[in-house]
Amino acid sequence: MNSDERPVGRSWLRNLPLIVILCVAVAGYLTLRDELSFETLRAHRDALLAFRDENLLGLAALFVLTYVLIVGFSLPGASVASVTGGFLFGLALGTVLNVISATIGAAAIFTAARWGPGTLVSGRLETSGGRTGRLMARLRENEVSVLFLMRLTPVVPFFLANLLPALVGVKFRNFLLTTALGIIPGALIFTSVGVGLGTVFDRGEMPDFSLLWEPKILLAIAGLCLLAALPIVIRAVRGREDP
């Protein structure tokens, strides 16, 4: 192998984790979308509850591992997993386990993307001039606020909110912090749905997520978004006032 081929080989190896994630995500969507469902949970509810009563720590560990794999490989069923956390462990412990699992899975995608194409893409963006260079500079100034907004606004798919920060070179500690804190509101909502899931199943129904669009929920999320955006507004105003 000559010297020209080695960088290509190394580049391929660095991209391998992200390639594996994308391939598993596609395969999972095609094969597991009907398996990781509320129907499956309802069919196995008695066995899961019995196992929980006998081995709470074991089930919690298995739950976290499963949820991390779902998020880390972008498999279908993340919302089912979040609701399951509330169903099996209650609001407090379920929310904690949901947040920990989703954060670890998000960190795995971020790391794979950063280790692969992220370094190259962010390096090129950093050295580019013009409008792109100015946008990157503003992102650096408001990194935490922008990441919080990505987590709080439901219009940004979770996978993209994990991938894009790695490609533009945000700091890992800021990504981890804003992920862990920014997903708490959503985790609380989905976990609370799971707390009453047994009653819903007994009625022969499926979970109702219409509460996500209730005014009190939307207003709370809007308030958090405004709070996250406040530092950006303050810096923008100060920038205009500077001579």
Image (cartoon, grey):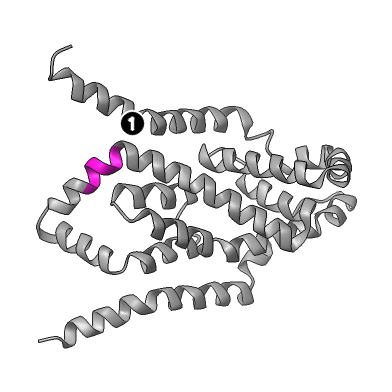
Q: What secondary structure predominates along the stretch shown in magenta?
A: helix
- Per the image, the residue denoted by label 1 is 15
| 121 part of magenta stretch | yes
Q: Secondary structure at mark 1?
A: helix
- Identify the image quadrant of residue 219: bottom right
Q: Quadrant of residue 49?
A: top right
User: In the image, is residue 59 part of the stretch drawn in magenta?
Assistant: no
Question: What range of the chain is rendered magenta?
Answer: 117-122
- Residue 155 seen by the camera: no
The one nearer the camera, 108 or 222, is 108
Name the residue: 70% across, 39% down: 62
Asked whether 198 or 235 is in front, the reply is 235
227 to the left or right of 204: left
**Residue 135 locus on image (x, y percent):** 21, 62
Query: In the picture, which quadrant includes the C terminus?
Result: bottom left
Does residue 1 appear to the left or right of 53 in the view shown? left
The x and y percentages for residue 31 are: 60, 27
Q: Is residue 204 left or right of residue 93?
A: right
What is the tally of numbered marks visible in this picture? 1
Measured from the top left, where is residue 66 in percent x and y?
A: 65, 39
Q: As drawn, is 19 to the left or to the right of 103?
A: left
Residue at the (19%, 51%) spot, across then down: 125
Query: Residue sitting at 19 percent across and 47 percent down?
Result: 123
Q: Amino acid at mark 1?
A: Asn
Q: Residue at x 68, y 37 (%)?
A: 36
Quick one: quadrant of the N terminus?
A: top left
Q: Residues within 10 Å of mark 1 (few under 14, many from 20)?
A: some
Does residue 164 appear anywhere in the picture?
Answer: yes
Q: Is residue 114 above or below residue 190?
A: above
